[in-house]
Amino acid sequence: MSLLIFQMSMIVLLSIACGRIARAFGRAQVIGEIFGGILMGPSIFGRIAPSLFARLFPQGSFAALEVLSTVGLILFLFIVGSELDLEHLRQQKTTALLSSLTSIVLPFTLATAAAPLFHARFSPNGVGRLPFALFLGVSMSITAFPVLARILEERNLQTTPLGATALLCAALDDVAAWLLLAVGMTFISANNSGPALWFRLLWLAIYLAAMFYIVRPLGRRFATKRAHNILTYEALGLMLAIALASAAVTDAIGVHPLFGAFLAGLCFPRVPHWQQSLRVRLESTLSLILLPLFFALTGLRTRLDLLNDLRTLLWTGFVLLLAVVGKMGGAIIGARLTGQEWRSSLTLGALLNTRGLVELIVLNIAYNAHVFSPTLFTMMVVMALVTTAITVPLLRALGIADGSSLQVRSSAAQFN
């Protein structure tokens, strides 16, 4: 227990320090936190002081970090799901819907087309081509909705038409990606043990129907009677219990528990002051303790030393190329098809190319399911870091300094 507490202390301090450094260089805080996890891992700390690293982070200590970080991710995905404005999604016009569709279809298509090449070189033994292709496609298609929201807020873009459209596209992308990931997990679980694939998919469909047609209406009725009140301690506890139970059910079905947490968030009553209260009450614990544990665990799994030859570096470059061309290209094509000008289309593409934390969650799920080898996992982590880090420089290159720079372009108003 003392080792775990000391590990947590180190992780929190390093996360704070690296986050501040990232902000000082004009980057999103999550970039610094991710890099802090890599600093703590075998690629850097493990090479500088291997004996000390082995004493502080023995392989047997990872299980406790895994449990705590999973609890943190369950709460985090619950918050993400609770903040998606489903009613606003229904009201959007062609640009948001088409850009979202193309920004997930194109990278997913490119990734699945290239999947046989990666499967032959970087897939662990026994992993089928279909689940591998699904995981690779989702990894290339995801957009980090929370990181994107933070970048937009830092640059005062969240209230602009383009910023709102980017958030809606990211929300739709994440919903689609999590559904695809749920299907992929059923393939992996069916290949390992337990009920047949069709039985797991049937239970998943039943559970989705139960959440959206029973739990969500009950939550809406509960909110109707108490919407004028604050989110009480008891109500918050009830909703967190539902989120944890939902995560447990999807895990039992053979889908990852994070999907259940995200689904519970989608069913959370859309009462603005309740949503704000939920984030305020949980954000400090998540941001300071639980999510840094996840970043540290990711860093402990990242082996930059595996990218030690020209061939592997070229494959890493290929991964990055597929990710950027697919995600940005898809968003740009969707925006152009609806008549947007090039500058607005390129800006939307740059915003949706942001991956960050949500990408790392997907990669860790693939790693734990033994779908990605350590080498491919490291390549994908590098891709996540680079695509997130280049978002702000791309916005600057496009002349998007802040929200006011978009107001002078009347065409941006077409994103409404």
Image (cartoon, rainbow, N blue to C red):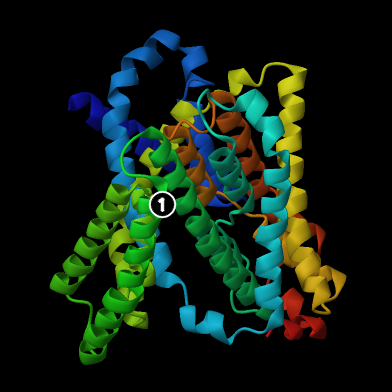
- Residue at (35% x, 21% y) in the render: 57
Amino acid carrying label 1: it is: Trp
> Where's the C terminus, which quadrant?
bottom right
Question: The N terminus appears in which quarter of the rendering?
Answer: top left
- Residue farthest to the left, as pictured: 234
User: Which residue is painted at 41% across and 33% down in the image?
Assistant: 297
The answer to whether residue 400 of the structure is visible from this angle is no
Q: Residues within 10 Å of mark 1 (few under 14, many from 20)?
A: few
Locate residue 331, reporting x and y percent. Answer: 73, 64
Q: Residue at x 47, y 16 (%)?
A: 46
- Residue 139 position, x and y percent, is 58, 46
The location of residue 388, given as percent across then percent down, is 63, 49
> Residue 210: which quarter of the image?
bottom left
Judging depth in this view, the residue of 357 and 220 nearest the camera is: 220
Vertical side of 371 occupied by 281: above or below:
below
Q: Eyeballing the image, is 81 above or below 310? A: below
Residue 397 picture quarter:
bottom right
In the rendered structure, the answer to whether residue 187 lies left or right of residue 267 reads right
Look at mark 1 in the image and give the residue it sits on. Answer: 198
Q: Secondary structure at mark 1?
A: helix
Of 221 and 399, which appears nearest the observer?
A: 221
